[in-house]
Image (tube, coloured by chain):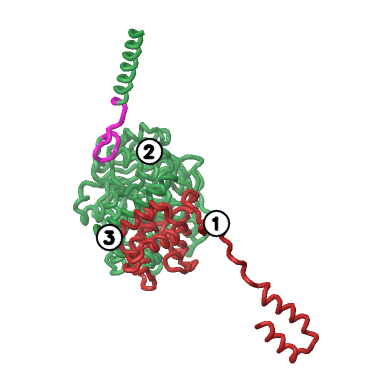
Chain colours: A red, B green
Amino acid sequence: MQGFKYLHMATHMCGLRSIGMLLVVCAMASSGCRPEPEVSFELQGLEVTPGFAEKDRLKTNEQWVAIVHTNLFQTGMPANDLYNVARVFESIGDQSIAREVLLSNFFNQPDLTLTPAEEMLADPDAFIDETYIRFFTRFPTQAERTFVRAFIQNNPGMTPELVYMSFALSEEYRYY
Amino acid sequence: MKKNNHASNRRAFIKKAGLAAAGISVAPYILPSGRLFAPTGMRSSEHVVMVAFAGGVRQQESVLQRYLDDSQGEPYPGNIMYNMFDGTPPENKIVFGTGTGGLNPIPSILSQTIESQGTIFREISALSAGHFGGLNSLVQGSTVTTQGLKQRPINPTIFEYLRRHGGYSATDVWFVGNGIGNSTPLLNHSAHADYGAAYAGNFFAPTVTFGSSGNQFMADAKIYHPENELTPMYKLKTFLDLQFQSLTTAGGGLGNTEDEKQNIKAFMKAMYAKVSDGTLDLPPVTDNGDLYTMGFAVEVLKWFKPAFMMVNLSAVDSCHSNFSNYLAALHRADHAVGHLWNSIQTGIPELSGQTSIICTPECGRNLQPNNILDQNEWLAFDHSDSNSLRAWTAMAGSGIPEGLSVGSETNPVGRVSDSMMTVADLLGVKPEVQAAGMTAPGTMSLLDQI
């Protein structure tokens, strides 16, 4: 129908010389740009993400800071800030302390929005999947999902902030 | 057949028993402190502070007290380091003090000089004419020709010897750096396979950590409840780490325990507050980076009361291009040492009377100047010739003889690497450091050379 409407308007406006070209456009609009039908061949769809076995390269301090900032704030850190943070990291011998202190600063920022604890507890599996994807760029194994779910449910003080901190401070997060 | 079996079993039993006995006699004992063997040396000091009086110090303006007499061809000798050395200050051409033109010398902090309280090695040999090589000789007791910038020390550092053989904890050994340039942050531990990060000293470059950048990104840290919040957070982290380490070998930290980490974080929080409030224990004059560095070093001593702390100064390196600024920096480095020693004796009761101090430049400076003139038309000095291999050591306090002077300009005694062995001696791990065999040939405790 859309194609015929365009054809009618064009006949009045541009004359017969454009009809041929418009017919081609109409044909493309009506059939050529249709999305491919999804064919599953009766197999269940599965999103493929890298596993932790492939993470063997240590992130630099700049990479770690840039990525954790993006993961938490959903926005990149300005290059100048990144440079300065890296300098501060260099000035602290125990890098694990530097990471913890920086993270706790991030969690103190008013513009950081975290998943509410109620939402995490209402659907822990979804929260766990989202957290694994966000920090580890992979889905949890079933064993991991089971453990983390039980851990969250059995530790009332465990907030999304503390879960995020555990992930951001983990060894796996230091590698890519 | 049966007899043979018995014989075979008996042989096997004897063999196993022998191996077991040998194993028991050879296997190390894990002591409560975590170290493998008890240190065999005798500890003669509870705390040692080593000042890397670094940046390249000429003998002429420091221990020889010649001021302008041996550098600019002007006949004005004098002592501009009167917290450390006995001797009268120069009377003319004063440029090293405060105020316009540096006309006002900084008053002495100590009523008795380090020299009069302890022992001076007036002429020792540096192992390197460069900063990084020199600093490496101070922390490793050696210089390795393949050691380069941006590379961890190849041989173990004094921090690692102390922790591995002396059983000192991570917060018992500290390195306070003057900054993060020149690979200074790499000096708190080596890359040696038998030592390394697990035995490292804790490190801060406080002018960066607690400077404007540190304040911007670190000062607003949350303090989490140790049991309700941190404990479950670490538990979950441990689970995640175990999952990951099942397939990879992730690197470890400095070996700070969780308690030590919390203590360091509390220290950082307190320092940001002190910087903000202006309540840091700074020297009376604080107009260069070395003086701020020393102020933070005193704060580290107050908070952690470590067995060993090394603090690195470097402002005298301005001598490459400005001799007047070099003199001012030398005067301030002496002021910084005066503040440090005074704070130890009067401001930290746990350290007073139980601490020794060792001050050693990592290298000297050239005999002949370069062509760069400063505001007073004085020539500057680099460090590359044989005069750059001349240095001194001043030490005092617990375990150090008083009022001794060893060696002279014509009779050098000792070397820069001896300072590290002296620390090992004072803190009871000298035999282990010697047995490790990784110090420069001839390196020995200065106490053994008196």
Give the x, y percent position of residue A165.
36, 60
- Identity, as a three-letter code, of the amino acid under mark 3: Glu
Q: Is residue B20 magenta?
A: no
Q: Mark 1 and mark 2: span between their CA atoms?
A: 33 Å
Closer to the chain start, of discs 3 and 2, is 3
Q: Which residue is tagged 1?
A: B371
Q: Relative to A51, is A7 on the left or the right? A: right
Q: Mark 3 and mark 1: span between their CA atoms?
A: 62 Å
Few, some or many residues within 10 Å of mark 2 (<14, 14–19, 20+):
many
Q: Which residue is tagged 2?
A: B414
Q: Which residue lies furthest to the front in this view?
A: A42
Element on which disc 1 rests: loop
Say which of A141 and A166 sits in front: A141
Element on which disc 3 rests: helix
What residue sits 27% from the left and 59% below the top? A155
- Identity, as a three-letter code, of the amino acid under mark 1: Asn
Q: Which residues fall within the magenta stretch?
A: B24-41
Q: Which residue is tagged 3?
A: B229
What residue sits 51% from the left and 58% below the top? A44
Please say whether residue B205 is visible from this viewpoint. Answer: no
